[in-house]
Amino acid sequence: MASGGRRLGGAAAPLVLLLLLAGWLAAEAGAESYQKFLREHFDHPPTEVPDRRLYCDLLMQRRRLAGPHHCKHLNTFVHAQPERLIDVCGPGGEPTEGDLRQSHDRFPLTVCKLRHGSWAPDCRYEVADAVERIVIACEGGFPVHLETEIPG
């Protein structure tokens, strides 16, 4: 019997399955991290509130960033389409340190800062709007962490 190709056998087959499983798990973890990024930092179009001063109070609670036992001290919401944020992981951004990338473009932002003396469960936030460049961490071509805004 002539064989034109090699057959995977012995220890190689389980190794290939293990590598495929590891790749699938990494992709799932990346997708989960991207979904968490969107929950914590994406709001486009910006959620409408009757009183702009209550925007952060409402969104931080809705997004489970403030609740009965914890108030996140600082969080930024980016008001741009997801495609623009994903683009920062590619040609719309440039590498900085590690897996961080800085955007070429400026993005409309709302920065929510916990008010002095505010404690869970009554988390109250100051609202500050800005248009700035952003720095994000990327995994698999998707944003997974908003590091900071770059002033100027």
Image (tube, rainbow, N blue to C red):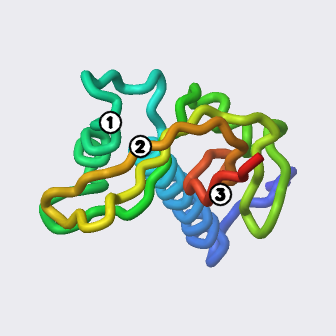
**Whole-percent x, y for residue 60 in the image:** 30, 47
Give residue 123's quadrant in the image.
bottom left
Do tag 3 and tag 2 residues touch (Cβ < 8 Å)? no
View extreme (front): residue? 116
Looking at marks 1 and 2 on the same chain, the residue that comes earlier in the sequence is marked by: 1
Disc 1 packing (10 Å; few <14; some 14–19; many ≥20): some
Marking on residue 81: none
Residue bearing mark 3? 137
Give residue 48's quadrant in the image.
top left
Q: Quadrant of the N terminus?
A: bottom right
Disc 3 packing (10 Å; few <14; some 14–19; many ≥20): many
Looking at marks 3 and 2 on the same chain, the residue that comes earlier in the sequence is marked by: 2
View extreme (bottom): residue? 11
Position of 16 with respect to 74 (left or right) is right
Does 119 appear above or below 88? below
Residue bearing mark 2? 127
**Whole-percent x, y for residue 10 in the image:** 63, 75
Could you tell me the amino acid type at mark 2?
Val
Q: Which is more foreground, mark 1 or mark 3?
A: 1
Residue bearing mark 1? 53
Do tag 1 and tag 2 residues touch (Cβ < 8 Å)? yes
Q: Secondary structure at mark 1?
A: helix
Q: Residue at (55%, 60%) from the top-left corner?
A: 26
Could you tell me the amino acid type at mark 1?
Arg
